[in-house]
Image: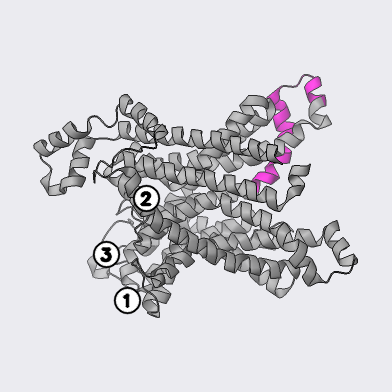
Amino acid sequence: MLLSIGRSLGWRLAQAGLVAILVGVLSFAMMRALPGDMIFRIAAARFGYDNVTAENAELVRSQIGDPAGISAFLGWIAGLFRGDLGTSLVTGETVLAEIAHQFGATAELAGVAILLSLLIGPPLGLWAGLHPGGWFDRATVLLASVFKATPQFLLGLVLIVVVAIGMGLLPAAGHGEARHLILPGLTLALGLAANTTRITREAVVQARDSDWWRFARWKGLSERQVVLRHGLRHVAVPVLTLIAAQFVALMEGVVVVETIFGWPGIGHALVHAVFHRDVPMVQGTALIMGLAFVLINALADIAARVLDPREAAQ
Amino acid sequence: MMPRCLGLAILAAVLLFAFGLPLVNETDPTAQSLLNALQPPSAETPFGFDHLGRSMSARLAAALRLSLTIAFVTLVTTAAIGVALGALASWRGGWVDRALVLFADSIVALPALLIVLIAGLILPNQPLAFWAGLSATLWVEIFRLTRAAIRAQIAAPAVEAARLLGFGPIYIFRTHLWPELAPVLRATFALTFAAVVMGIAALGFVSVGVRAPTPELGLMMVELLPYWREAPWALLQPVIATMATLLALTLIAGGPKV
């Protein structure tokens, strides 16, 4: 078991390395291909669009050098090993400090979204899977398809119009209080829950068909006992893997949802960094998102092996 | 089978509307007439006019044409890349296989919208950026499925016999591998198509996609959102068009396999 965990961790490590290189190459390609002098663009972001003069641009140039050069790329890679992501070209703060600040807000939102989706998805899927073919099952599957097909921004829009403006129950934008979390969290959660419901349902249907389930029933356990003792553990593995795999979709949703709800997180920062051609910030945020994905999947690998020792035993 | 037929019917209706409308009604989707601003639907103009007095029907059709065309071209590109690399990986095996899988795993770790945003800055126009950015990320799913499906087939006796008889890889792929692969890929093709439509609309909605005045579904929703009280029917049109397209594709992809 340790060997298989080690092998999967080695794979994740290679993945992390390649993610870093891809992010670097992509963002430097972007910098080289951009039309216009990016120094002026950065100066505009620093001083405001009406105050860009040749002197200001020269000032910026003397401070940061040529940000699209090969030496800048190699310097960035070298910095990664020291845990240094560089300095934001716009604010002058270190990228790490900026991201640490924004990542908190995003983690809060993503955490609430995952929690809500776990409260909605698996219970529905479990109940539907235990009664396949019933009206509840068919209604759940239909609803899951509808929510899966609904883009997150549309869901956010509907929630804002109906709950925030129409009923006036919750604020449409803002940050800081618990009530601000509900609408953006729910927007992300409903999309995630559509998938967890389907996966849970299928896992339960498949489990009910299996030999071990029939054996457990045959030896005298009640349906309820089988579900609690054996079923949940079996279902947890695909759900866990799915959540880890959906992390990137969650991050993508975060970009959209943060922009709609004005949430000061990492997705919001990324869009702005791309606009202002703040290379180190683009690299930093993309890298953190990519590495977080790899880390979460590595943890899910381990958790899945602990929960389900059957695979490792083979 | 029923849901799939329903999905195909909806998609056919959307396609007919998007590509058929310009044939019967040549209204310019960007022509403004403030006299008509927010005119509700009537017998002559069943879709009404938007806040700048532009024909909603012409804009809706143009927006759908844009999304559907990009989605189609992207699907063809991703399918070609995904199937080719997937076949290569499972055919060659060894380090080629491992390198390709690692590459695919790393692409998946990056948010697709980020890659599209960056492509939007590198490439001169937005449709091209959507195509490049979305193709660069969406091939992975097709690659994985192809690799898994072909791996099982390559060891089959039929393929081995064909190899021993001296048939080339292209012949074997066409006669033995593709027939097994096609049904597996159909659902993914529908979902890839849906992902492109959704991605374009999402970027339009957060105002980093196609620029005004080009009609685009997400952009139309943002433009009409401030008028939702006066003209809910106008806001609903792009919403319904987007939802109908996505739902149709989801239905075609098929529900969970029981």
Crowding near the residue tagged with mark 3, few <14, some 14–19, many ≥20 C-alpha atoms within 10 Å: some
* Residue marked by disc 1: B230
Classify B170 as above or below B257.
above
- Specify the subunit that label 3 lies on: B
- Specify the subunit that label 2 lies on: A
Q: Position of residue A41 (x, y in %)?
A: 21, 41
Both marks 2 and 3 on one chain? no
Amino acid type of the residue that numbered disc 1 sits on in the rendered structure = Glu
Amino acid type of the residue that numbered disc 2 sits on in the rendered structure = Ala
* Mark 1 → mark 3, Cα distance in angstroms: 14 Å
Q: Secondary structure at mark 3?
A: loop
Marker disc for residue B146: none
* Mark 1 → mark 2, Cα distance in angstroms: 43 Å
- Figure colour scheme: one colour
Which quadrant is home to the C terminus of chain A? top right
Question: Outermost residue toward the top?
Answer: B166
Q: Is residue A68 left or right of residue B255?
A: left
* Residue marked by disc 2: A100
* Residue marked by disc 3: B52
Give A250 or B152, whichever is nearer the viewer: A250
- Pick whichever of labels 1 and 3 is earlier in the sequence: 3
Both marks 1 and 3 on one chain? yes
User: What is the span of residues highlighted in magenta in the rendered image?
Assistant: B161-186
